[in-house]
Amino acid sequence: MTKHEKLMAKCLELARKGIGYVSPNPLVGCIITKNNNIIGKGYHRKFGGNHAEVEAILDAKSKGYNLKGATLYVNLEPCIHYGKTPPCVDRILQEKIKRVVIATPDPNPLVNGKGIKKLREKNVEVITNVLEEESKDLNKFFFKYITTGLPYVTLKVAQSLDGKIALLNFSSKYITSEESLKEVHRLRSAYDSVLVGKNTILYDNPSLTVRLTKGRNPNRIIIDRTNSLPLDRKVFTDKYNHKTYVITSTNIFNKKNKNLKPFINYIPIKESYFNLSTILKSLSRLGIASVLVEGGKSLFSQFIQSKYFDELVIFISPKIIGQGISSFDNFKIDNLKKAKNLHISELRNCGSDIFFQLKK
Amino acid sequence: MTKHEKLMAKCLELARKGIGYVSPNPLVGCIITKNNNIIGKGYHRKFGGNHAEVEAILDAKSKGYNLKGATLYVNLEPCIHYGKTPPCVDRILQEKIKRVVIATPDPNPLVNGKGIKKLREKNVEVITNVLEEESKDLNKFFFKYITTGLPYVTLKVAQSLDGKIALLNFSSKYITSEESLKEVHRLRSAYDSVLVGKNTILYDNPSLTVRLTKGRNPNRIIIDRTNSLPLDRKVFTDKYNHKTYVITSTNIFNKKNKNLKPFINYIPIKESYFNLSTILKSLSRLGIASVLVEGGKSLFSQFIQSKYFDELVIFISPKIIGQGISSFDNFKIDNLKKAKNLHISELRNCGSDIFFQLKK
């Protein structure tokens, strides 16, 4: 690793501290150096809060440093527009920082190279593309959301070696190990929302919260077209039910449905537009930039057949179940060439299980 | 690694050269050193041929070395009994070798520590348990066979991410990558036999030979109780058909079945004893110490429910098939605690696929 890469890696490490709290903003970390010493650090802590650059500048100044001639490392191009805070580029110029090292341009159409251009015009040296891939991966939710207007969608499957997510009697508790469950909770704490089909709530009655690790709970989105789920389910009755959203058909919703409950949020969608595309757009409008799909097989199958998923994570437990519910068997192909091919982006042990991350 | 371990690793490397040719004998490699120089090397090349120790002694002597005071490294305890060749222990004593370094005792009841005992009684220094685990793993077939009288059984499954070994229309060609197919051929070249059920021959018509890598063809064992497979299948008609065995019911066999073919071997088993236990014992009596089970799901399911398999290797291709033939769904459990739990002994990429080795 070069010196720039090492310092950018530290920015990414700082940025990660914002996981779960900054969405739909990007995760950004910033380090300021002068005469080869780190004099300021900061990261974007919370949606609406200071940008990382400002945090690092304030940190350095609080220690009495003059930033003139300093170098600023940041994993995303500094902004040039007035959002919830003033433009970072102006602040950098004001502090007479002489060099800015960036991992990636900001794909936000309001920035997208304009920040870099303005800095260079004002004679600030700008170095770009340092740890670009790592940085894009860290902000994969933001990049997808800002460029397409749709959330980043990951399917999460926990299955046996023989591809079963439950027994024929729908029993599915503890297919995977405790360590895998922890990993699932870590994922939940990083995603803006988890999305499940009606049957998952009906049969498994999951909490879909973060318990085995620290982190905030995601929004819980349930697709229940006919709004017919019993109201005794955990997602409707626990103390986080203000974070529960039911996606239902407008027809049903408008019929003064008695199955509506206080605190629960409803997203009514017109019957003729009731599909993954409309559902994801509705979530996007709520500021949801990332969706972790947790089942069941019908929803998994719909996503696999669509273009709307970005990633698949699978926990495979080394056990053989025999007959059971398969992870994705609500569709059929007649030729192996029509199978959905993915590529493995990560593979590792997870407790006694295996964790796969796959991308399209 | 210590000096002893490094030299034992070389023995194991030599031993591997015998893969496919020495069964049901063990794979054995031998190195002789004197004054810290390697002066002789050898390995057991072929069933009935010289033992590794003799090969290494002859190698050293052919180069003019006197073995008095030398150290001999060998991965299996030298034999003390007259088999197809005279006892190696006597030869070691005769050559006045002063030290013997061994990976594991020979579990063969005819040896089993007696070789080590005799060497020590004759004042040869014996060091044992050097790279013991690696050595046992290399000779897993031999260890199973010699201690239980049954062959080592490995189930080999090639499946999609969602646990399918074929489409609903039985199409299964090219589920996995070329690299995985090569690995399967390497496995075949190391196993004494491949075993398949009748339907695999009927629907897939495989050759079950070694083509994508160097190595000898395994015996091809087909379970066809009613001996009703069509005789145009590759295993019956190709030039290796003298290595094809059909396991069939005695009742059928004795009825002057017209479906018998020259060159093909038949293993008739009494109807009332027609089960995995009898089948494996019959193979064992033919000197078959290892069996690679290549399908289909009915045979896989029978083995998984029995105590007769030792290992499972799975190639998982990163594709989603949807509805299809599951690898193991000829049985059903009503509680996840009854699932067959395995542990992962190896995990690696294999071309675009993943290779798992699992043990009970």
Image (cartoon, coloured by chain):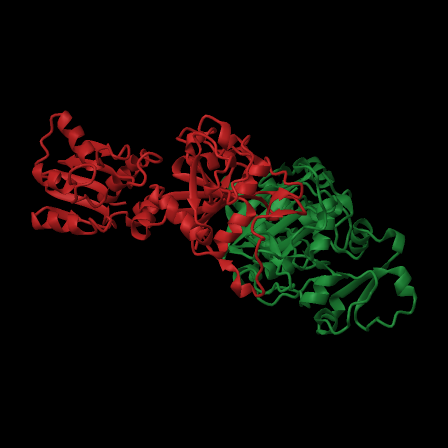
Chain colours: A red, B green
A329 in relation to B335, above or below: below
- In the foreground, A162 or B34: A162
Which residue occupies 77% across, 47% down?
B81
Which of the 4 image quadrants contains residue A138?
Answer: top left
B112 in relation to B207, above or below: above
Which of the 4 image quadrants contains residue B121?
Answer: top right
Residue B90 at least partly seen: no
- In the foreground, B331 or B118: B331
- In the foreground, B224 or B139: B224
In the displayed image of the protein, which residue is found farthest to the right? B255
Residue A11 in the figure: left or right of residue A161: left
Which residue occupies 63% across, 54% down?
B157
x and y percent of residue A243 in the render? Answer: 42, 33
Residue B254 at least partly seen: yes
Residue B229 in the figure: left or right of residue B103: right
x and y percent of residue A238 in the render? Answer: 49, 27
B335 in relation to A103, above or below: above
Residue B198 in the figure: left or right of residue B169: right
- In the foreground, A42 or A300: A300
The quadrant of the rendering that contains the C terminus of chain B is top right
